Image (spheres, helix red, strand yellow):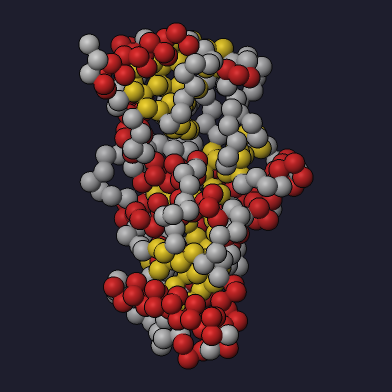
Amino acid sequence: MNGAVEFLQATLLILLTAVCTIRRAAPEPGTAFRAQDLADLADPAAPVAPVAPVAPVDRERARPHPETAPAFADLADLADPADPADLSGQPALPRRRRATPNSSVLVLNGEAMTWALDALPDLMPLGVDPVFRGIEEIAFAVAPGWTRVYETVSGRDLADFGLVQVATFPRPTATVLSAISAHLRAAGRPTTSTSAVAAPSKLYQLVRLAHADLPVPITYALPREQLRDSYDELSSVLGAPFVLKALKATGGRLNFLIHDEEELRQRVEDPAHANELFLAQRYVPHNGTFRLLVFGNEVRLAIHRCATDGSHLTNTARGAHATLFDLATFDRVALETAVRATKALGYDIAGINLVQDRTTGEWSLLEVTPTPALATGAFVAEKLEAYSEYLRTRLVVS
């Protein structure tokens, strides 16, 4: 019992220290929280990548208080109702709910602490509001210049808590923790017990790229049980069909186009996918993927890949046709986007996957890999030549 008390006291000391160092004025009791539009959430000084226009936000429309919010922060409610014709094909974006004062603390995977708090209520300082959630109750929404990471019980954004603490690390905590940390850092929010275990992932990349105002497709990462039953909500925001892809998969593995509710359920419930985390992402209609190779903040090669079997996947390992493009005549917006993406993630070498919407002409950033295949795939000689030139420049070899 003494050990439990000491653990709880140490945890409370961490919470109090963080809570007392960051104070923000809370809304007056009983006052409705105003919706905040995307311009408020983005850095106005950041360069803005060209994206399709989004629906105007009704700033006076009240949002539910977190304690009275629906059990599931459904995507249809989080999106702005708008005539799709006004969006030029771009789905409406979800909005973040403003929430509570910074004395509230979110403890992830800390269910074991609740019994101690019940047994020793006097140890909790007056005014500190602990909220306990499991990692399976955390969801993500990503769009250019904007992210939401929220707990699905009340719909509160993690950035609206004074502190987020990770108590234990059951799977898949480490996989998504880097994305949570990136979201909270962008919002200026403290965390504890995150940096040592957070591993970069596709979700982490999407969060970082979105905060850099790069044109990533709108993406959701939902708990499995909610993902399985969310076709209507997802398709209302992402459009149909939309892409469902595994967080850790590579080379086009576990990457599907979802056309209806039954197909989504089958993919999510497949026993072979029991250990997979999936991303639901807007599908960009295109005529092939461009792989741009960046070395030392300069695009050295542009390779176009297109499927020969009608698939939405364009991996050369799966039989896609590859063509080398002349950089001198290549679209400057795409080249600039590739370099910006590389810098945003702190890479010196990267493979950037871009697609161009065949209807609007807008570019979308699908993936950034710091380990592009140089010795395999198409145009190996050209890739190795570009790499050798980078090494000569980087190492100042005559």
Q: Taking 166 as reference, is 19 above or below it?
A: below
Quadrant location, the C terminus: top left
Quadrant location, the N terminus: bottom right
Q: Quadrant of residue 105?
A: bottom left
Q: Quadrant of residue 119?
A: bottom right
Q: Nearer the viewer, residue 36 or 19?
A: 19
Q: Nearer the viewer, residue 384 or 66?
A: 384
Residue at coordinates 25% horizontally, 48% vertically from top-left? 44
Residue lying furthest bottom: 122
Rendered location of residue 232, percent (x, y): 64, 49
Rendered location of residue 371, percent (x, y): 46, 28
| Residue 33 seen by the camera | no
Rendered location of residue 309, percent (x, y): 66, 17
Residue at coordinates 44% horizontally, 41% vertically from top-left? 205
Is residue 149 found left or right of 253 in the rendered image?
A: left
Q: Quadrant of residue 163?
A: bottom left
Q: Taking 216 as reference, is 301 above or below it?
A: above
